[in-house]
C-alpha cells in the first residue's frame, strides 16, 4: 500500500470531505497544512496542484487534485468499506449530493457564511460583509434546507444508508456549525435531526473537535 499524504487546511470543506472519507475507510495518512492563498505553499504543492487548490493527495510518488476525484479514487482503490451503494442509480444520487454540497452549499455555507462570520476578522483582517451573511441566512440556506428536507430518506440522504452523500453534505455543514448557525428544528425537523446525526458521527465529531481547537488558537 502506498503512503498517502494530504495537503490542505483543515477548515476547507473539500479537505474535510477527503479527511472524512479517509477516516471512514480507516486509512492512515500524513497531513501537510497548506493554505492556498498567498505565496507560502511548499514547492511540492505548487509543482503538483495544477490549479493551486486544496486538497491535493500524494499517493507514493503520484498526485491527485480535487476532492471529488480523490474520493472517486479512494472508492475504487479501497472498496472494502464502500461509500457508494451498489445500485447504479443510488450511486449516481450520492454523486449528485456530492456535487450539490461542493457547489450551492459551499457558496452559501462556506463562501457567504463561514468566510464572513469567522474568517473575515480572524484571517482576512477585515470587517465581514453583512450583505453576504444576510443572503446566506435569509435566502440561500433556507432554500438548501427546504431541499434537504424533501430528500432525506430515514437516517441518511440515501435510503440505502450512510454514503458519500453524507460525507459531502456533512463536510460543508460543519462550516455552518463553526459559524454558530443552527438549522431551525421547528421548520426543518428532518434536516435538523439529520445534520445533528452526521455531525455527531464519530468521523465528523473528531474532525470538528480538532478544528475547533485550531480556530480557538487563532483567536
Ligand atoms: N473542486 C475542488 C475545489 C477546491 C477548492 O476550491 N479549494 C479552495 C479552498 S476551500 C481553494 O483551494 N481555493 C484557492 C483558490 O481557488 O485559488 C475540490 O473539490 O477539491
Image (tube, rainbow, N blue to C red):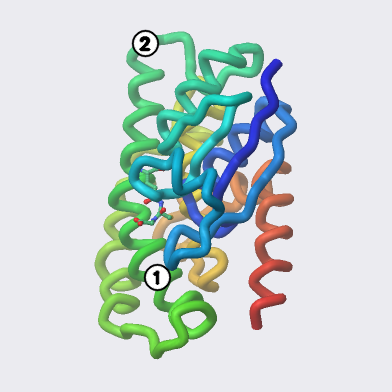
The x, y position of residue 79, in whole percent, is 59, 13
Which numbered dot is residue 143? none
Residue 134, placed above or below residue 44: below
Q: Quadrant of residue 102?
A: top left
**Quarter containing the C terminus:** bottom right
- Viewer-proximal residue, 78 or 172? 78
**Quarter containing the N terminus:** top right
Some atom of ligand 1 lies within 8 Å of the CB belonging to the residue at label 1:
no
Some atom of ligand 1 lies within 8 Å of the CB belonging to the residue at label 2:
no
Which residue is at a point 41% across and 49% down the rendered structure image? 53
Label 1 sits on a secondary structure element that is helix
Residue 35, placed above or below residue 99: below
Cβ atoms under marks 1 and 2 closer than 8 Å: no
Residue 6, placed above or below residue 185: above
Label 2 sits on a secondary structure element that is helix
Which residue is at a point 32% across and 85% down the rendered structure image? 130
- Viewer-proximal residue, 24 or 185? 24
Residue 64, placed above or below residue 78: below
Visible residue check, residue 194: no
The crowd level at tag 2 (other Cα within 10 Å; few <14, some 14-19, many 20+) is: few
Residue 12 vs residue 1: left or right?
left
Mark closer to the chain start, 1 or 2: 2
Q: Which residue was labeled with disc 2?
A: 88
Q: CA distance from mark 1 to mark 2?
A: 34 Å
Which residue is at a point 47% across and 63% down the rendered structure image? 183
Q: Which residue was labeled with disc 1?
A: 113
Which residue is at a point 36% across and 11% down the rendered structure image? 88
Q: Quadrant of residue 165?
A: top left
Is label 1 or label 2 in front? 1
- Viewer-proximal residue, 38 or 25? 38
Amino acid at each position: 500500500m502506498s503512503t498517502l499524504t494530504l495537503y490542505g487546511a483543515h477548515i476547507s470543506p473539500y479537505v474535510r470531505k477527503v479527511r472524512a472519507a479517509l477516516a471512514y475507510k480507516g486509512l492512515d495518512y500524513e497531513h501537510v497544512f497548506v493554505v492556498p492563498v498567498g505565496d507560502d505553499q511548499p514547492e511540492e504543492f505548487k509543482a503538483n496542484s495544477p490549479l493551486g487548490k486544496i486538497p491535493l493527495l500524494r499517493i507514493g510518488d503520484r498526485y491527485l487534485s480535487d476532492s471529488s476525484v480523490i474520493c472517486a479514487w479512494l472508492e475504487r482503490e479501497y472498496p472494502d468499506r464502500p461509500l457508494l451503494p451498489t445500485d447504479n442509480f443510488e450511486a449516481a444520487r450520492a454523486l449528485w449530493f456530492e456535487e450539490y454540497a461542493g457547489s450551492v452549499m459551499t457558496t452559501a455555507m462556506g463562501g457567504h457564511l463561514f468566510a464572513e462570520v469567522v474568517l473575515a476578522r480572524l484571517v482576512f483582517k477585515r470587517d465581514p460583509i453583512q450583505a453576504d451573511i444576510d443572503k446566506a441566512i435569509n435566502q440561500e440556506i433556507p432554500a438548501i434546507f427546504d431541499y434537504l428536507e424533501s430528500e432525506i430518506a430515514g437516517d441518511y440522504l440515501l435510503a440505502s444508508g450512510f454514503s458519500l452523500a453524507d460525507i459531502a453534505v456533512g463536510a460543508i455543514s460543519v462550516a455552518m456549525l463553526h459559524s454558530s448557525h443552527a438549522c431551525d428544528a421547528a421548520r426543518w425537523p428532518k434536516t435538523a435531526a439529520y445534520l445533528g446525526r452526521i455531525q455527531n458521527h464519530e468521523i465528523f465529531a473528531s474532525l470538528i473537535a480538532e478544528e475547533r481547537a485550531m480556530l480557538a488558537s487563532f483567536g
